Image (cartoon, rainbow, N blue to C red):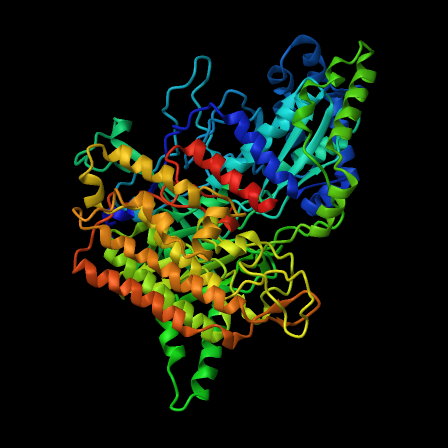
Amino acid sequence: MLKLRPHESPRTVRVQRIPQHGLADLRKEICNILEENLTTCEISAWFDQYAPSCKVQWDDDFLEYVERKMRETGRLSDNGWTDILEAMQKHKNGDNTFKHIAVIATSVAEAAKERDDGLEPTAIVKPTPYNVSISEVETYKFKPDIRAILPFPNEQLNPRFFRRSGRIHKLKNTEEYKEGERLSSMNTSDTVIVGEVKKGTGLADVIDNELKLCGAATELLYNDPCRRFINGFTIEGSFMRVWRFERSYACVSSDFDFHKEPRLFILFLLYITFSTHQDLGFDPTVVRYTTRVPKEGIQIPDPKNPSDYETVISYRYQVRDKYFLTIGHPISESSAWSIASRSTRVWLVREIFLGKDGEFEEGTETFILKDAYPYDDAVLEKDIKDDIIRQLSKLDKQHMPPTSYAKQAEGYFLTYVHDEMVKLPNENNVEWSVADLTTDMSVKEPINFTSVKDKEDDVFAIKPQPSSIRQGSQRQAVRDAQKPSTKVAKQRKELNYHRRKHVRTIHKEVCQSLYELPDWHTLIRCLIDIIEGLNLLRLAGWVHRDISGGNCLWHMDGERGKIADLEYAMPYDRSGEYVHDPRTGTPEFMAAEYQARKYFQKVKVEDHPKLRVVPLTFNFYHDLESIFWIYAWSLFYHPPSPCVVSSENPLELIGCLKQEAKEWFGCGIEGNSSRLLTVQGARHADITYPLENVYTFDTGCSVLLNGLEIVAPLSTAYGDLEGTPLQLITGQHARWRHAQFSEALYKEMKNKLRGVLEALSGNKLDVYVRPLSDKNAHPRDATDKGHEDDDDPPAEKRAKIRVHAQVSQ
């Protein structure tokens, strides 16, 4: 049996410690972000697009049969669903009114099985307004009014742990709840669909349902690596809408009266009750394993004492005919919190070899697995690296004597074992055969969430009228509040809601990100290697466009810095082809003029001296500037121990550093004047000043401030470059020639950092506090929808949303 090392502690069920305050604001911001990718379609088109097998499996004759059975049993009358209509008169709240949906769903399932005795339910509909969801990640307590759940846990026995203890338990919630709440064993991972319901039909009711549903969908997708998409529904009075949340966008159907159109309601219940796991959003290529094991430090656990145990979770990812088992918590998963995003998760894994009866043998070699949803036209990282090596090989042959750039480059980039699109089983259950892409919805239209500002409008004070007229008036007000302006609708349609493809990558080297490095000696060595890697990228004619602390890696075994995450890299010759290309990168580390979208100097274009507007083109020096910002950021956020322990109040000192850092690192993707002035004017003294009282001579750390001098040659290089004319490629696309970028800058920056290493005289200068996780120790990539290093999870999520909003703008 393979024993886990301490840093490989398995993923465990995390206690829900996040307070509820601020939840309403968080949900509003979720909707504000998602609105950019919110679409609508007719209810019939929703079924055609997202549940195409429904109308094949359950045709009009089948639906007519089920409807007739509902009428015969008294569930359905000419006025609608009897139990719900009666409850509308008896009860004040929606919980007691719409709990009957579960009874209706059971009756529909029974009638369907009478018609087709081969049907077996894959989900059970339950009213759950008091049942708290039990998540694997820290989250708010969310309690959907209605949910469909799997009849059996979405998990398998893990043979590795089975051999150790033989005790496999479904996840249980043992937390104390507010008065009146019931103990729940409803795991988020077993939830198939969520619904929010209201008796009322006004804007306030619609808004509340939208906020809660989108918040729940966000948490469901974030919690569960086994999930590809999630469905939901909202009901206000008799009006129902059906929702689909995918990694490209969210789509909500037009509303329909589920009392007057019972067959649509029946079809929806059949879909969520009898569809396959794959059709309901689960990824058949990812399997969850859980087991109960003794807590760390407990030598002889008491089988009768649950507090002696914890539930351990691992995931088995499939890549073609190979399988990899995760070890511990994800290395990174923060971007998976945003619905319409790349949803990147990174894990430490080992390959496993399946045997009989679910047993498997586990390999000894560890790998890194990345699961993500890039745009469907994105080039795979392995293909990008291969092209870089090819370009360097060509360059090697052109020199006399031949150079060895291609061979050198292999050491500065990751070794990709697998890098390909995820394939799903087809309708005949043939594995790894259908490319996993988000749905191509051709009939969708842009729509807004119901405007929050309308909550206090007079529409809620509609004069007394007959119920049917009042509902119709309120619903029309809702529809009007959801319509985007003509200009906004046109802009969103032009975006065409880019599809995403599901990509799984395995690379060989297990590395530490710069955020995780334990000492400054290693950090500086890593940055020197990254500069050399960027120089090789320049020679190959490629720009990275996303250099950050998260993709500057240190390979411990090889003692080499490596550049990761090539998905945004592109040939320099293509840089600037599309003037309105979205900016990529982490705001804290982006080049200042790239953030501002304008050059430091007024530039001219060769043979076009009167051309006034010259859009900025990303170039090689912009990648290099990120090294300066990473170094400066590390001085503020990862001070060495001698600087901190010498202080009378270490926590206060850390807080002051973070506060001072905001002048340069508290900005969003647009940057700010402090960053521009620091680089353009080579004013490293400005950024050094707030650090001088911390990095003192007595602590032996003052030498680290010399590393900020790398901005001086960078500023000079910018000035020299922008003093020469650009070459016009197209009407708006202009760039400098490849040969105008000097290798001298790379050498000078490396030499300055080597000087700092020499001055350290072997003193490693351990970082004061080693990062605990990617969630609270470093910035978030703007392309990954989030940043900020706040230890409070709600604040972290709000920060995540703020940067996403800045990117969207």
Give the total number of marks visible in the rendering: 0
Q: Position of residue 266 (x, y in %)?
A: 71, 32
Quadrant where the C terminus is found in the figure = top right
The image quadrant that residue 194 belongs to is: top right
* Residue 124 visible in the picture: no
Q: Position of residue 268 (x, y in %)?
A: 68, 35
- Tell me which residue sits at (58%, 66%) in the image: 575
Front position in the image: 529 or 416 = 529
Picture layout, residue 602 above or below residue 17: below
Picture layout, residue 714 above or below residue 112: below
Name the side, left or right, on which 576 lies relative to 65.
left
Picture layout, residue 66 above or below residue 390: above
Front position in the image: 512 or 163 = 512
Q: Position of residue 805 (x, y in %)?
A: 57, 41
- Tell me which residue sits at (17%, 36%) in the image: 299
Name the side, left or right, on which 228 lies relative to 187.
right
Front position in the image: 591 or 234 = 591
- Tell me which residue sits at (42%, 61%) in the image: 564
The image quadrant that residue 260 belongs to is: top right
* Residue 733 visible in the picture: yes
Name the side, left or right, on which 209 lies relative to 328.
right
Front position in the image: 191 or 114 = 191
- Tell me which residue sits at (59%, 70%) in the image: 726
Q: Position of residue 464 (x, y in %)?
A: 80, 9
